[in-house]
Amino acid sequence: MDRGLAFLLPGPLDTPTGGFVYDRHVISGCRAARLEPKVLVADGSYPEPDEATLRHAADLIAELPDGDVLVIDGLGLTGLAPVLAPHAERLILIGLIHHPLADETAVSREVQTRWVEREAAALRLTRGVVVTSHTTARRVSELLSFPIDRIRTVPPGVEAAPDLGFRNVPRPDGPPRLLSVGTLIPRKGHDVLIGALAELTALDWRLEIIGEARDPGHASSLKALIGMMNLSGRITLRGAVTRDDLDTAYRSADLFVLASRHEGYGIAYGEAVRWGLPVVGTTAGAIPEAVPDGAGRLVPPDDREALRGVLRDLLDHPDDLARLAAGARAAAAGLQTWTTTGASFAGHIKEIGKWALSRPIG
């Protein structure tokens, strides 16, 4: 591809969320493919950035030479559409969609409708779209009316699985250690998990929740819910942690639980399997794509009773938990690596770059 490549991101590349983890790895994949991408950061409040953010993004975009490829992370794409539009003919704009904005769950129907209209309009500025799951590909095509033949799917990967021999060593005495990893926003369903565990106090367990308090109000409500349920001695909200501390948490846990209401893929589920952890999740969005058969049990989203039932079964029957853990260990070696993800992403960028100018935008 004889054109320059740039990524336009809605925040710093080291932001500790799954979407930015994906961005970091596919940018590395493009570098490995000798595409030499520039990284442009227009930090701000998305999906509705303020005027200062729009001006900054406009300045960054204006500096790109004609014919360059610009990949825009989906969190910023819709909000930045006004400053992208003037460049849609001279640049090759490619959307990177983790999931449609309207699939966020804690917004009104009116807001969802507005986001669908605005995101669909933003996508009409692009020559192609890369998504992180087959589920998201269908959603982008059907919900946002984007041509399916211009969508490419590149699922996330994981680092090579560690030596999981430590899972065969008898664990220290103590209650089962549950781990949940996800940003503290309503979509992650931590409130559902807390409610389910509040009805299992007759069993012994401890839960650690790791995730940035991206929504401070929601984080405060979770803390209040834990206190109201008298679970402060059992549930710990740790907030964001370092990579080493996160690895330690996965290594120390016995069961991974995340009751998401929607995921465009669900990187944390794959990461749990990589560490040989059995998974309890939901059937929402692309989560079934992220959890290999035999490595986890999935329940409908927002179904606290079903979640409680699965957790009770696994906590009350160690042999069932051990079988699920064995399934996770067996699946770990077969997970797609980030190297494969990065190479696939770079290949699709080259492909779109070759045929994009022969196709109209929209």
Image (cartoon, rainbow, N blue to C red):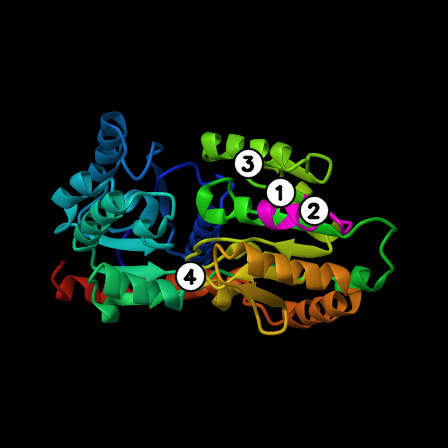
Q: Can you tell which of label 4 and label 3 is closer to the viewer? A: 3
Do labels 3 and 1 touch, CB within 8 Å?
Answer: yes
Residue designated by label 4: 285
Residue at left offset 38%, top offset 54%: 98
Quadrant housing the C terminus: bottom left
Residue designated by label 3: 222
Hey, what amino acid is under mark 4? Gly
- Tell whether 68 sits left or right of 240: left
Q: Which mark is residue 209?
A: 1
Q: 337 or 175, which is in the foreground?
A: 175
Q: Distance between the residues labelled 2 and 3?
A: 20 Å
Of callouts 3 and 1, the N-terminal one: 1
Disc 4 on helix, strand or loop?
Answer: loop
Of callouts 1 and 2, the N-terminal one: 1
Of callouts 4 and 3, the N-terminal one: 3
The range drawn in magenta is 194-207
